[in-house]
Image (cartoon, rainbow, N blue to C red):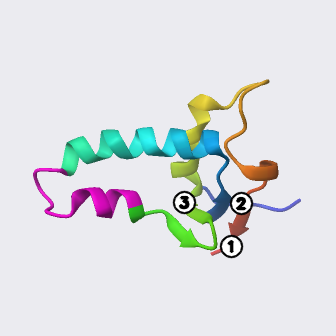
Amino acid sequence: MKTVNINDQVYVTLTPEGQKILQEKYEKSFLVVKDVFKDARELVENQHKAGGGKYCFVLWELCSIFGPHMYNGCKIPFENNILEIEKS
C-alpha cells in the first residue's frame, strides 16, 4: 500500500468547472488581503500556477477548496480525474 501525506504537493489540470471554483476562492481571498497588499489580486491569482496549464496545491488545501464541490454526479474539477502527487 502506498502512503500519501496530507502536506504533499499535488498537481492538477483544472476543467472549466475547476477554474470557476478556484476563481470564486480567489475573489473571497482578494477581499481579505486587498487593503494589505498593493498587488493583492496578482498575488492571489498566481499563487497556485505551476506552468504548463497545471496548478499546484498542498493536498489539504486542494481538499479544502474543491471538496465541497465534489460528489457523485458533480461536474469534475480536474481533467481526467487525475492528481499528480509529489512525494516529500
Q: Distance between the residues labelled 3 and 2?
A: 14 Å
CA gap, disc 3 and disc 1:
13 Å
Q: Which amino acid does label 3 sit on?
A: Phe
The answer to the question of whether label 1 and label 2 lie on touching residues, with beta carbons closer than 8 A, is yes
Whether residue 55 appears in this view of the structure is: yes
Which disc number belongs to residue 57? 3
Measured Cα–Cα span from mark 1 to mark 2: 8 Å
Q: Does the magenta stretch include residue 44?
A: yes
Outermost residue to the front: 16
Mark 2, secondary structure of its residue: loop
In the picture, the quarter occupied by the C terminus is: bottom right
Quarter that holds the N terminus: bottom right
- On screen, residue 51 versus residue 73, left or right, reads left
Residue holding disc 1: 87
Instruction: Give the label, 3 or 1, closer to the camera.
Output: 3
| Of pointers 3 and 2, the one earlier in the residue sequence | 2
